[in-house]
Amino acid sequence: MHRGTVRAKPGERSQRAEVCMTAQEVRLCGLLLREHFGEVVEKVGTHLLKSGAQNLRTIIHETGISLDLIRRSLCVLVQHGICMFSSGRKGPGSPMEYQTSCDRILRILRFPRYIYTAKTLYGDTGELIIEELLQRGEMTMSSTVKTVADRLTQNMEEGRSMDYSEVSSAFSKLVETHFLQRCPPMAGAGTTKSATPATPGTPAGTPAAPVSTAPPTPESFPDCYKVPHVTLIGRGKRQLSSEDGEDQRNAKKARMDSETHGDEGIYWQVNFERFHLHFRDQAIISAVANKLDQTSSEIVRTMLRMSEVTTSPIATCTKPLSANEIFRSLPTSYNIARPILDQYLTLLVDDPMEFVGKAGESGGGMYVVNLHRALANLARATLESVVQERFGSRSARIFRLLLRKRHLEQKQVEDFAMIPAKEAKDMLYTLLSQNLVQLQEIPKTPDYAPSRTFYLYTVNQLPTARMLLQNCYKTVANLVERRLFESRESKRLLEKSQRIEAILASLQASGAEPEQLTEVEEMITAPEKQQLEALRLHINKLDSAENQVDETIFLLESYINSTATSAS
């Protein structure tokens, strides 16, 4: 077995294809679980990652955690779609088995990007809807609409409020564009329930047992994207700021819980795959804009938008589109004449990056977007960029040369790259030591004598991308650890700052005098303010670095998955 790799034990593998997880992936997953759900959930989650599918008794025995904590941890993981459960391998009646995967946990890393995308496409309302669903895992439409309307009202001017109908409209748009989907109902359930045993109304210690042998997928039932008729009339409410209003809030919450809106038992979750398709399309559009111009990118954007519904998520290219269809679907603001469009399409087809291909001549020409080839080119550009940043422009020149020529001897590398022999030799050996370049031996005779053997340098893009992906996992894990360490070291100061901010907010709400506010603000000394500012700046930099590395992770993962799909 490859060093640093964790595999599921032979008797505990799931029915799907065997999944290999590296130590770096497991480490990063553990850090994400600890940060968002606590140490107990982290221990249960990482145990399931390393051990594969296990029943409740086995998990308790091998982790040494109490039954109640195990149940609560599994409920949290199932609630957020991280843990799957199904009947045991011995068939119906056998103990329920739980399993998880790195892919589902690593989604947590992308939460800020999901939220920002929703804000970009659907404004503040869409942002808060996605944020609430990511935080809670799954919710009913009525509950989501009320919560989001209340949060929006809280930030509005006094006397203004958000109407439930506006939030419902944004929710419906997210469903129509498949960014939200219904949780699949459990097979054999007598009533309409959520896809997981831990619904928002289910006590944390009592996970329900499904009857099916395998968890159904959301797309496997017809009502996946059907919005129910919800009777919601009213506007968002402001939270009561006084402590005396606690009893009123509790009474109001109990009254709201007893209300019916027509969508009881219908839970919704974020469709991560749809977001990933959007990220992939945006990466392709951005690459075309950088390589050619904005008009070319708008043509590719139009082609991707037209083929969203007709193209499978795992397809290597979009369905063919005629030039006539593309022309009719272009935004009117661009005013592109038909002859100009034909020139742009020809330019895109002839471009070495091959983002667009020609599939026929009917209808003025049939064109496709080469999704797999585009991802391969984007991954290749990422690899070249990494080599240039780490080893300099001359090493990047050698790396690009080997990618283009496939196999070259050392003397050929020196000649083609126009680099002195000594420098080229040092650079090749440095790249070879980092596994970015491989050396292939081709013997003239069976004895492999060095004098009768060709030594060819080459770059294998797929294994190199996998290696870089593991480096990215390690980098993000280090960034998360550092951020947690910084927060832990300054815990007392952060708690003091939060208490003072809460006191200030309470005084401002009650209409306190400016002298009182100034007196509270002075409870934090000038050195403490400087320390807080430096800490926030440092943490913001770490957060930004995490998001940037995650973009590289997404690109490399998409390329690797696309390669596996096209090869199968």
Image (tube, rainbow, N blue to C red):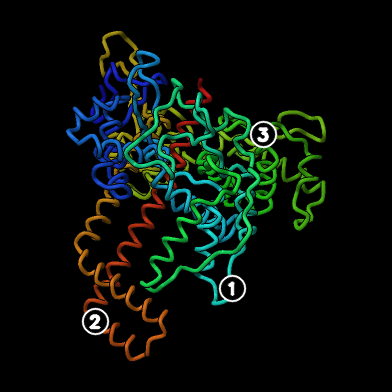
Disc 2 crowd rating (10 Å Cα; few below 14, some 14-19, many 20+) is: few
Query: Type of residue at label 2?
Result: Met
User: Crowding near pointer 1: few (<14 within 10 Å), some, many (20+)?
Assistant: some
| Badge 1 or badge 3: first in the primary sequence | 1
Q: To which residue does mark 3 refer? A: 357
Which quarter of the picture shows residue 503? bottom left
Residue 149: image location, x then y, percent: 55, 61
Q: Percent position (x, y) of residue 327?
A: 79, 45
* Drawn side of residue 86 relative to residue 238, left or right: left
**Element on which disc 2 rests:** loop
According to the picture, the residue beneath numbered tag 2 turns out to be 523
Which residue is the extreme one toward the left? Answer: 64
* Crowding near the residue tagged with mark 3, few <14, some 14–19, many ≥20 C-alpha atoms within 10 Å: many
In primary-sequence order, the first of circles 3 and 2 is: 3
Q: Do the residues labelled 3 and 2 touch (CB within 8 Å)?
A: no
Label at residue 454: none
Can you see residue 428? no
Under mark 3, the amino acid is Gly
Q: In which quarter of the image is the N terminus?
A: top left
Mark 3 to mark 2: distance in Å? 66 Å
**Residue identifier under label 1:** 160
Distance in Å between CA atoms under marks 1 and 3: 53 Å
* Label 1 SS: loop
